[in-house]
Image (cartoon, helix red, strand yellow):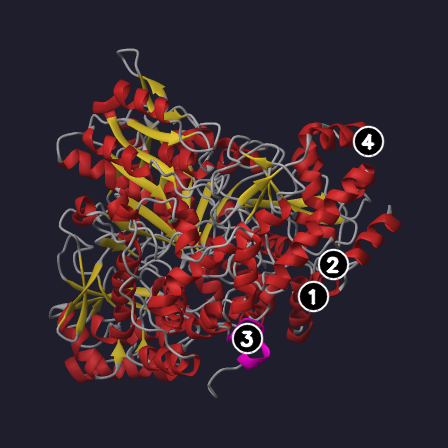
């Protein structure tokens, strides 16, 4: 284990078998306290015919030292060559600050900052990201990230349509083809229509006159036009002309940008295009932060204008924003704002189904921008341009070679016309140890062989010379250096960005201090229900950071990506074994996106079988908000049909015990049967109860011709025990950032791989990896619905899961799940004596991995008498958990007056007991001194944040001249975790 940069023996939990630190004695005592039994007995209420008879077919667990060796060996199967790849994903040098921030566990492992008083670290990093991107782009409202550029295009199109009465978006056909495929896939079966505008044949660029003519021909149907600043040939578009054409045509302009090219000395900021700037911007920002990582996860940049003239457009946007706020004592702080647009509140009326975003990538992108500073960003921007122009000028004079559209300006990418097929040239380059570029033959009307070559600050002058020498060896010496056009002055940035610059040591210390403001599962029990905040092993992150994985470009030749493709193939095999389902796609980058994939598969399946009329999606009332928002995003819009019948989402009532009401379900099937496209059910459900009638419901849906989606958010309770194929599931997502121990990152990146039944295998998106002899090869499914990511999805998270599954092995998967259920049952047994539980009629129903507590009616009345309105009580109780050094449970979901607790398998009995003692102390405090809730939390860096005021007066970015100030911890979670619960209780009483 000498290769590891940490000593695992000094890290609590890291060397525990299956990362379960509870001893056998702990386990026996926990069973005894919760009614006895054994691991299989925890699942005795689930029918045997839907359970696995044995553990899933995985290899035996690997010992920790062997695991490190195995991951290094696999990464070395990739071949990272000197390369000029960048067509769909640019690659720049990774700044030193990134490794430092990635080592701050309280930033990497923390949850989405819904509890702002204990999340100021993450919130400030997002404020830095939003503010630096605002400076680069000139847009005041940059959200704190979407998945990637491709999916952000769809969100931008939806946003533009929402702002207008039109239903069509005109799209420049010279966007990156992978982005266009994702856009088409998302729009299928929705009311959003796409029209495509080809570039001018003579110039390879979009013309403003063509935009105006096309918009006019569509007679008021166009809501917006999407165009790139740099197109798929590398040519710089006349963005002034295009933005003005959109304004003249009275449609929104959506600009697609590369933020690195907007640095001082670079291209014009989108806020300055034409007379009034672009209206919406979309971009890819992964290269601001990290290397290629085989294409993932991405960092979707999205922004709109927000100023005195345009105050309300931001309310139509997708995703999260953070904004300036004050706490009750007047301290400046940061908080998430505009949440009432989001799925967890608005459900089917949300502006997007997005739940997790790329939060941690945004964190390190902001840090990297600050670390580069004004001069560093400008240098990186200039380096690619200078080397690209020098190389292109020479290549243009080699016999038989020509720069495509040599009369048009480019920045750091250009297309080279070849005298032989590009594939043949690429093969020769690979033999010479070069990844020359990307075959883009077919992107121009001439149908000539084309190679796209990209430069950044990652190549050296020697690399550029080597490229030229290679082509000279093929076709003869360059005869000189051609004069190629520079970018016209009116398309360049005028003036400086004005980014601040800080010493690296100061930045490192600052981000370390930000980490101290958060709370992590490393510290102790993190009881957030339905979120599975388990321990995230250090070795998983180390493996994901191996250079053989991180430096591989997604457009590298298949022969040089065998390590990564083998890993994806193995994930497919293992997750099929774990779920029991015969098909799997690794492409979705979030649970919500996995849901969308599932419903798009349903739609494609029904259309393929002549059943496109199916327009009903059944969803229980207790479902996660994403389910409703996803159904709407997929095209299941609540509306009245011409015959007066409703279409879209049909709600299934919950029975008093929290499960789906079977009488209501039967009535809905009878009423809508031949129109049912599918059913979405979380299992175990959001009350922590297994839907024991799931198979019966699935059979009924199948008889009616529909399909069954299982929300896999709670797979941590049943993985390795329940066979989803036998259960009747047609599609399920697995949240890798929950069950499969990927860190949450303060809200992302997530991952939502989707398993499917035999019905849907041929419709899967992206590529399936198949094994042909000793080679791993990507193939398209026969009826693939398209793609949901421009490349391979979040590859780094697949590395983490692969590493984790090797450590768990065959026995570890069911043991992990059973231990999570036991921990929950144990806490429920301890706390159920003091607190009532919800649902009210579920007293005899076995809980799985989580449970919901509430207060007695007397408690509620006592607290109301102290001056706190009943609707606010549960959230105030949640704040009191922060004072005990814990994150709050999930408050007011799915029960308005409930606290949902999920302990996971990651803690010892002593740690669970300490948490239970804290909950009991909280109960005692609110009964003896209910007025204490008014001042909670009191030990966090800030008091309770005034979120209402922050939303009333939105401040979404500012020009950074110094590092944002930090409010220090009054008592850190580490200190609180070391204190006896009785002492904390006494301190709370003393503080008043």
In the displayed structure, does residue 781 sit left or right of residue 71? left
Upstream in sequence: badge 1 or badge 2: 1
Q: Which residue is most to the bottom?
A: 2
Marks 1,2: beta carbons within 8 A: yes
Q: Give the Cα separation between the discs numbered 1 and 4.
A: 37 Å
Q: Residues within 10 Å of mark 1 (few under 14, many from 20)?
A: some
Q: Which residue is mark 3?
A: 96
Q: Nearer the viewer, mark 1 or mark 4?
A: 4
Q: CA distance from mark 3 to mark 4?
A: 52 Å
Foreground mark, 3 or 4, reads 4
Q: What secondary structure is marked by label 4?
A: loop
Q: CA distance from mark 3 to mark 1?
A: 18 Å
**How many residues crowd mark 3 within 10 Å: few (<14), some (14–19), many (20+)?**
few
Q: Main secondary structure of the magenta part?
A: loop
Give residue 321's position: percent from left, percent from top: 57, 44
Q: Earlier in the sequence, mark 3 or mark 4?
A: 3
- Mark 2: which secondary structure? loop
Q: Quadrant of residue 794?
A: bottom left
Residue 201, placed above or below residue 368: above
Judge the density around disc 2: few (<14), some (14-19), many (≥20) Cα neighbours within 10 Å: some
Q: How far apart are the two marked residues, 3 and 2, measured between alpha carbons?
A: 23 Å
Identify the residue under disc 2.
Answer: 966
Q: Is residue 980 left or right of residue 476?
A: right
Where residue 699 sits in the image (x, y, percent)? 23, 34
Between the C-alphas of marks 1 and 2, the distance is 8 Å
Tell me the residue that label 1 is attached to: 513
Residue picked out by circle 4:
866
Report x, y in % for residue 822.
50, 55
Task: Write the start and end of the magenta stretch as one range.
Answer: 7-15
Q: Nearer the viewer, mark 3 or mark 1?
A: 1
Label 3 secondary element: helix
């Amino acid at each position: 284990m000498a290769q590891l940069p940490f000593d695992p023996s000094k890290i609590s939990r890291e060397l525990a078998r299956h990362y379960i630190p509870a001893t056998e004695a702990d386990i026996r005592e926990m069973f005894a306290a919760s009614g006895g039994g054994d691991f299989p007995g925890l699942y005795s209420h689930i029918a045997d015919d839907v359970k696995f008879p044995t553990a899933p077919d995985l290899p035996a667990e690997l010992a920790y030292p062997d695991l490190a060796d195995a991951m290094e060996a696999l990464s070395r199967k990739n071949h990272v060559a000197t390369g000029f790849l960048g067509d769909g994903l640019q690659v720049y040098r990774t700044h030193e600050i990134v490794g430092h921030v990635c080592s701050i566990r309280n930033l990497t492992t923390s949850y989405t900052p819904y509890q702002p008083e204990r999340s100021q670290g993450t919130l400030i990093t997002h404020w830095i990201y939003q503010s630096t991107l605002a400076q680069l782009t000139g847009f005041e409202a940059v959200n704190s990230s979407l998945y990637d550029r491709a999916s952000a295009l769809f969100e931008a199109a939806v946003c533009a349509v929402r702002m207008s009465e039109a239903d069509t978006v005109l799209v420049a056909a010279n966007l990156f083809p992978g982005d266009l495929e994702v856009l088409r896939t998302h729009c299928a079966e929705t009311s959003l229509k796409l029209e495509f505008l080809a570039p001018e044949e003579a110039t390879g660029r979009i013309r403003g006159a063509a935009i105006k003519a096309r918009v006019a021909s569509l007679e008021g149907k166009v809501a917006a036009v999407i165009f790139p600043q740099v197109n798929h040939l590398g040519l710089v578009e006349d963005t002034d002309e295009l933005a003005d054409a959109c304004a003249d045509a009275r449609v929104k302009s959506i600009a697609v940008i590369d933020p690195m090219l907007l640095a001082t000395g670079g291209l014009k900021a989108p806020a300055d295009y034409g007379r009034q700037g672009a209206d919406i911007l979309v971009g890819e920002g992964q290269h601001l932060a990290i290397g290629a990582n085989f294409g993932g996860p991405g960092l979707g940049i999205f922004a709109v204008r927000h100023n005195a003239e345009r105050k309300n457009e931001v309310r139509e946007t997708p995703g999260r924003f953070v904004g300036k706020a004050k706490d009750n004592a007047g301290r400046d702080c940061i908080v998430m704002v505009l949440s009432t647009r989001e799925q967890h509140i608005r459900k089917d009326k949300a502006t997007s189904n997005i739940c997790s975003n790329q939060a941690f990538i945004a964190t390190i992108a902001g840090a990297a921008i600050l670390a580069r500073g004004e001069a560093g960003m400008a240098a990186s921007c200039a380096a690619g341009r200078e080397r690209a122009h020098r190389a292109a000028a020479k290549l243009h004079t080699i016999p038989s070679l020509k720069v495509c559209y040599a009369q048009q300006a480019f920045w750091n990418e250009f297309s080279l016309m070849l005298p032989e097929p590009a594939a043949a040239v690429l093969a020769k380059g690979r033999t010479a140890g070069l990844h020359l570029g990307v075959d883009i033959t077919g992107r121009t009307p001439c149908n000539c062989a084309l190679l796209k070559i990209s430069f950044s600050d990652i190549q050296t002058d020697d690399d550029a010379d080597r490229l030229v020498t290679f082509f000279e060896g093929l076709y003869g010496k360059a005869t000189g250096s051609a004069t190629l056009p520079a970018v016209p002055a009116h398309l360049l940035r005028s003036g400086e960005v004005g980014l601040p610059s800080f010493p690296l040591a100061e930045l490192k210390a600052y981000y370390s201090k930000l980490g101290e403001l958060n709370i992590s599962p490393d510290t102790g029990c993190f009881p957030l229900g339905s979120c599975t905040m388990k321990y995230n092993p250090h070795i998983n992150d180390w493996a994901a950071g191996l250079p053989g994985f991180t430096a591989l470009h997604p457009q590298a030749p298949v022969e040089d990506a065998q390590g990564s493709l083998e890993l994806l193939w193995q994930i497919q095999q293992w997750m099929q074994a774990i779920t029991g389902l015969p098909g799997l796609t690794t492409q979705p980058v979030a649970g919500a996106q996995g849901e969308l994939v599932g419903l798009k598969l349903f739609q494609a399946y029904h259309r393929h079988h002549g059943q496109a009329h199916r327009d009903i999606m059944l969803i229980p009332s207790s479902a996660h908000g994403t389910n409703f928002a996803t159904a709407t995003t997929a095209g299941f819009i609540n509306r009245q049909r011409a015959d007066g019948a409703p279409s879209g989402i049909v709600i299934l009532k919950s029975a008093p015990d929290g499960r789906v009401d079977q009488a209501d379900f039967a009535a809905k099937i009878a009423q809508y049967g031949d129109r049912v496209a599918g059913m979405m059910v979380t299992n175990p459900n959001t009350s922590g109860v297994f839907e024991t009638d799931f198979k019966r419901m699935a059979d009924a849906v199948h008889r009616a011709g529909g399909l069954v989606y299982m929300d896999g958010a709670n797979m941590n309770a049943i993985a390795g025990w329940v066979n989803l194929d036998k259960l009747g599931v047609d599609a399920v997502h697995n949240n890798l950032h929950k069950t499969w121990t990927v860190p949450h990152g303060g809200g992302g990146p997530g991952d939502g791989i989707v398993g499917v039944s035999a019905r849907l295998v041929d419709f899967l998106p992206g590529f399936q990896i198949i094994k042909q002899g000793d080679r791993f090869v990507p193939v398209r499914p026969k009826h693939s619905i398209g793609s949901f990511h421009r490349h391979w999805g979040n590859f780094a998270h697949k590395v983490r899961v692969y590493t984790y599954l090797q450590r768990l092995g065959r026995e570890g998967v069911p043991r992990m799940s059973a231990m999570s259920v036991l921990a929950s049952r144990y806490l429920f047994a301890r706390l159920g004596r003091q607190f009532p539980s919800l649902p009210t009629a579920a007293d005899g129903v076995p809980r799985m991995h989580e449970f919901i507590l509430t207060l007695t009616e007397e408690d509620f009345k006592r607290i109301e008498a102290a001056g706190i309105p009943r609707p606010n009580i549960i959230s105030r109780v949640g704040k009191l958990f922060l004072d005990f050094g814990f994150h709050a449970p999930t408050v007011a979901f799915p029960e308005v007056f409930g606290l949902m607790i999920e302990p996971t398998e990651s803690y010892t009995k002593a740690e669970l007991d300490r948490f239970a003692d804290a909950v009991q102390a909280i109960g005692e405090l609110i009964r003896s001194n209910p007025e204490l809730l008014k001042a909670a939390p009191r030990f966090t860096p800030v008091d309770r944040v005034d979120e209402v005021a922050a939303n009333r007066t939105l401040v979404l970015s500012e020009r950074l001249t110094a590092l944002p100030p930090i409010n220090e911890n009054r008592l850190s979670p580490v200190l609180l975790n070391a204190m006896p619960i009785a002492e904390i209780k006494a301190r709370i009483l003393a503080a008043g």
